[in-house]
Image (cartoon, rainbow, N blue to C red):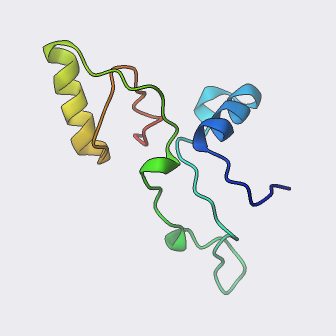
């Protein structure tokens, strides 16, 4: 049971990282009052909201350094729709696949 207190993406990610392999830890977390269901009672995946910026786990920002890092950050920014990419950011943790 989880109370109505807001739990941040970092807290959730840290808790799950201690229990699950890295590839099983979600990159984004969206709070839902309840899961959207189809008339048949199955999960309605199309009705799930897209994660927003604060849904992703974040870390302390360190700007990209050098030509290569700046170029990669620019590409990731365009692909992922994330405005600011740091040098220690993980492509998959930012929502890439």
- Name the residue rendered at 58%, 57% in the picture: 30
The reply, left or right, for residue 8 in relation to residue 78 is right
Question: In which image quadrant can residue 61 be found?
Answer: top left
Q: Nearer the viewer, residue 54 or 19?
A: 54
Image position, residue 39 (x, y; %) = 67, 87
* Relative to 70, residue 9 above or below: below
The reply, left or right, for residue 4 in relation to residue 26 is right
* Relative to 73, residue 54 above or below: below
The reply, left or right, for residue 29 in relation to residue 82 is right
User: Where, quadrant-wise, is the C terminus in this rendering?
Assistant: top left
Residue extending furthest toward the right: 1
Image position, residue 79 (x, y; %) = 26, 43
* Relative to 87, residue 55 above or below: below
Number of labels in the image equals: 0
- Name the residue rendered at 51%, 49% in the picture: 55
Image position, residue 5 (x, y; %) = 73, 55
Question: In which image quadrant can residue 31 be found?
Answer: bottom right
* Relative to 12, residue 47 above or below: below
User: Where, quadrant-wise, is the N terminus in this rendering?
Assistant: bottom right
Residue extending furthest toward the front: 5
- Name the residue rendered at 69%, 70% in the picture: 33
Image position, residue 14 (x, y; %) = 67, 31
The reply, left or right, for residue 50 in relation to residue 15 is left
Question: In which image quadrant can residue 18 be found?
Answer: top right
């Amino acid at each position: 049971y989880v109370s109505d207190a807001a739990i941040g993406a970092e807290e959730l990610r840290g808790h799950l990282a201690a229990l699950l392999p890295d590839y099983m830890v979600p990159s984004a977390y969206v709070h839902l009052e309840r899961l959207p269901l189809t008339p048949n009672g199955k999960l309605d995946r199309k009705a799930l909201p897209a994660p927003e910026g604060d849904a992703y786990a974040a870390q302390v920002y360190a700007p990209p350094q050098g030509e290569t890092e700046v170029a990669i950050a620019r590409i990731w920014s365009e692909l992922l729709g994330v405005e600011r990419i740091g040098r220690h950011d993980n492509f998959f943790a930012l929502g890439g696949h």
